[in-house]
Image: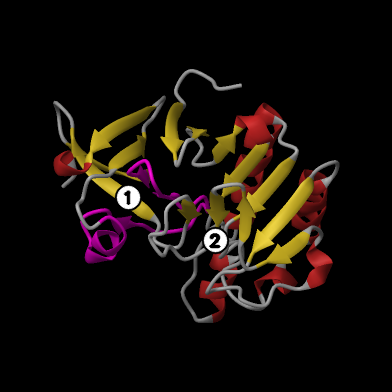
Amino acid sequence: MGLVGDAAFDLAGVTFLADLSGALLWEAERLLVVSDLHLEKGSSFAKRGTLLPPFDTAATLARLASVTARHNPRTVIALGDSFHDRHAHMRLSDADRVQLATLQTGRDWIWISGNHDPALPRDLGGTVAEIIAIGAIAFRHEPTGARGEIAGHLHPKARVATRARRVERRCFVSDGERAIMPAFGAYAGGLSVRDAAFAKIFPQRSFVAHVLGDSRLHSIAAAKCY
């Protein structure tokens, strides 16, 4: 059930609920979708000499636990780049492995392969797929612009003006035919919706950015995003 602060939008004839956390809910299917968790990004950067606080995986999984507890989905789809690199799953702590196993208990869990994690191992629990289609809706990592597609990869963020200042936040992007999800990971960056990469998917720039605010989502027309 949607809560105050969430935003509903239609996609190819199906109603979805955009959750303030950055997850997407298909209530009729009891299906929860998250994208670009980028687990173990902190440890990946540390291996290259850039020190980041090593808490991104725990923080991301805690947020994911909160949203799954709130909506109690029957199925969870992780839309690719769930792990920051090919070996990130090997660096998971024991506590994070337990948390992940707990999240999967009692529900179907589907890992979509991404460009950062193209060869997910089979011992993470759940199943691995390149693309999942349910009726008219297709879930994949990299967007193609096809009708009914829900993808991630681009980490959309929008800069909008308030009365006091301009702010930049993660967002869902949709034109009613296709959608791109925000990155869910604690350390995942973002790409402006004004970037040319979005123009390839939404050539008329007729999309709406559902921006993650402090207490609710704000639906902003593309023309009003800077």
Q: Residues within 10 Å of mark 2 (few under 14, many from 20)?
A: many
Q: Which residues are magenta?
A: 173-202
Q: Do the residues under discs 2 and 1 have CB atoms within 8 angstroms?
A: no
Above or below for 168 versus 40: above
Above or below for 1 versus 201: above
Residue 191 among magenta residues: yes
Q: Secondary structure at mark 1?
A: strand
Which SS type dominates the magenta stretch?
A: loop
Q: Which mark is residue 191?
A: none
Q: Amino acid at mark 2?
A: Arg
Give how far apart the Cα atoms at labels 2 and 1 are. Answer: 19 Å
Above or below for 224 versus 130: above
State the image quarter where residue 40 is shown: bottom right
Residue 201, position as x, y percentages in the image: 31, 60
Q: How many marks?
A: 2
Q: Which residue is mark 1?
A: 157
Residue 123 among magenta residues: no
Q: Which residue is mark 2?
A: 140
Residue 152, position as x, y percentages in the image: 47, 57
Q: Amino acid at mark 1?
A: Lys
Residue at image point 41% right, 65% down: 144
